[in-house]
Amino acid sequence: MKLDRYHAQANEQEYHALRARLLEGNYIHQMFVRLDQLERDYRELHHDCEQAGEVWARCPPRLKQQLHDCGLGELLDRLATRAV
């Protein structure tokens, strides 16, 4: 009887240890999936910034001045600098 109880406790401990390892592995997998998504998002954002900078570089001076006056010019200047 004691032996059966010992085996039951050992099996339960093993079950909880295996479950913890699986959960940890799942968490690590999810973190890698999230990291991949962040990397794709960064590349897409970088590409969008490059395009915005290129458009800003071709923007007529009068429009550039109007955008500077409303506060967007500085941001667009930085994008244009990074696109070059």
Image (tube, helix red, strand yellow):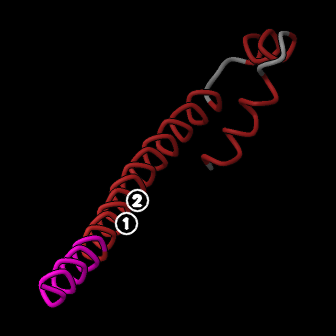
Q: Secondary structure at mark 2?
A: helix
Residue farthest to the bottom?
Answer: 3
Asked whether 11 or 54 is in front, the reply is 11
In the rendered image, the quadrant that contains the N terminus is: bottom left
Residue found 71% across the figure and 45% down from its top: 81
* Left or right, residue 66 beside residue 7: right
Residue drawn 29% across and 62% down? 26
Q: Mark 2 is on which residue type?
A: Met
Which residue, given by chain and number where applicable, does mark 1 sit on? 28
Kindly report the distance in space between the C-alpha atoms of the residues bearing marks 2 and 1.
Answer: 5 Å
Asked whether, in this view, residue 52 is left or right of residue 62, the answer is left
What is the count of numbered marks? 2
Identify residue for label 2.
31
Q: Is residue 77 magenta?
A: no
User: Looking at the rendering, which quadrant does residue 35 occupy?
Assistant: bottom left
Q: Residue at x 24, y 80 (%)?
A: 14
